[in-house]
Image: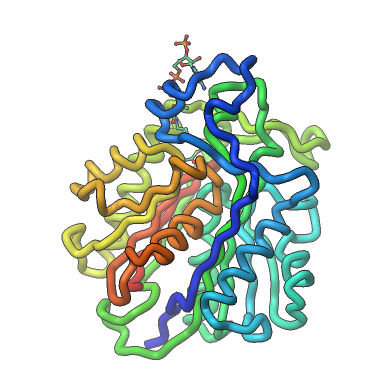
Amino acid sequence: MRRSVVLGCGAYLPERIVTNADLPKELETSDEWIRQRTGICERRIAAEGETTSDLALNACRNALERAGCGVDEIDVLIVATATPDHTFPATATRVQANLGMKRGAAFDLQAVCSGFIYALSMADNMVRLGQANTAMVVGAETFSRILDWNDRSTCVLFGDGAGAVILRGEEGKGDNTDRGILSTHIFSDGTGYEMLYVDGGPSTTGVTGHLRMEGREVFRHAVTRMAEAVEKSLETNNLTTDDLDWVVPHQANIRIMDSMAKRLALKPEQLVVTVDKQANTSAATIPLALTAADTDGRLKMGQLVSLTAMGGGFTWGSALLRW
Ligand code: ACO
């Protein structure tokens, strides 16, 4: 049976670090409030003129180098983003051009914070069906550009960054001891549309707008939906939470992750956490966290890793893979 195996992953964070203490005094917030409610200590903010495609390009180059893969081997490039460079064409096509990738297909995917899981699911299906042999899946965002910097209930939560994962089709036995993606699950419920949205866009106001959110409702849904999505993936593969080595959740808030871990009876040390240093980078959080855990040697070949996310829409999902 053909599986999508992770060949390598990579990351890029803008240089500028903004700590909680660096946030504007007019916001009337504090390091203590932000840390206690979210676990966030600092975030990276893109430089003036630095775009989502720039961040994605650097993450792709890093992933290609770490995977020992040439750009000419990539059959499909998917960029998950809610903050594209332009309304069209796809940010992925700009990344494709800047990588010097002259073949294959490149397109964007929009599922906000669940975008990476959605894109991974698309890429996995393409690889398993033989439509692509090698796929590069990117999560890249410049959320700093869509924040209302006068709204303390949202602007303290987000940061900018990009991460990329390269998948390659490999034949194996097809049981759950094989390396690669065992399954992906994606879900949405559009009745949550107005709980988390940007109050602008080409077809409404004609300008981009700012992020608006019902924080408590989003919190509640995030815990429930991410836990459910992890359980669904385990059930599908006849596995249980005891089989899991690592869970890499979307990094929105440490309290969301801890509550989800509690529901799944996971040990806190099984969670990969980067929210303290990077805040919520939307579609980029999972590939950034995966790259961090791969770089410091936590992820070992053969380990069972669960990825899960929830975001605007509402959208949510999971991927279960053997590293
Ligand atoms: N600094 C200081 N005070 C603040 C801040 C801030 N940055 N933000 C809000 N407050 C105040 C509020 O004004 C309110 O004051 P009041 O009681 O005088 O009215 C008080 O703090 C409590 O506000 P709540 O919104 O009730 O605080 P809550 O405990 O719900 O925490 C938070 C807010 C952190 C946003 C929480 O709801 C949350 O994490 N929600 C999840 C949202 C999230 O992470 N979204 C990311 C995108 S979606 C995703 O990625 C899954």
Q: Where is residue 7 in the image (x, y as percent from the top left)?
A: 47, 78
Residue at (46, 62) in percent of width and height:
291
Q: Which residue is drawn at 42% across and 54% down?
A: 317
Compared across the picture, whether 156 is left or right of 71 comes to left
The quadrant of the image that shows the N terminus is: bottom left
Q: Which of 223 and 257 is in front in this view?
A: 257
Q: Is residue 182 left or right of residue 105?
A: left
Quadrant for residue 299, please give it.
bottom left
- Residue drawn at x 20%, y 49% as measured from the top left: 267
Q: Where is residue 64 in the image (x, y as percent from the top left)?
A: 59, 76
Q: How many labels does the image show?
A: 0
Q: Nearer the viewer, residue 200 or 211?
A: 211
- The percent position of residue 12, horizontal first and vertical second, equals 59, 58
Quarter placement of the C terminus: bottom left
> Is 141 or 106 nearer to us in this picture?
141
Is residue 244 shown left or right of residue 53?
left
Residue furthest right in the image: 206
- List x then y, in percent, for residue 318: 39, 58
Q: Is residue 155 above or below residue 316?
A: above
88 is higher (above) or lower (below) than 136: above
Image point (60%, 53%), residue name: 13
Look at the picture and state if 113 lies above or below 89.
above
Q: How is the image coloured?
A: rainbow
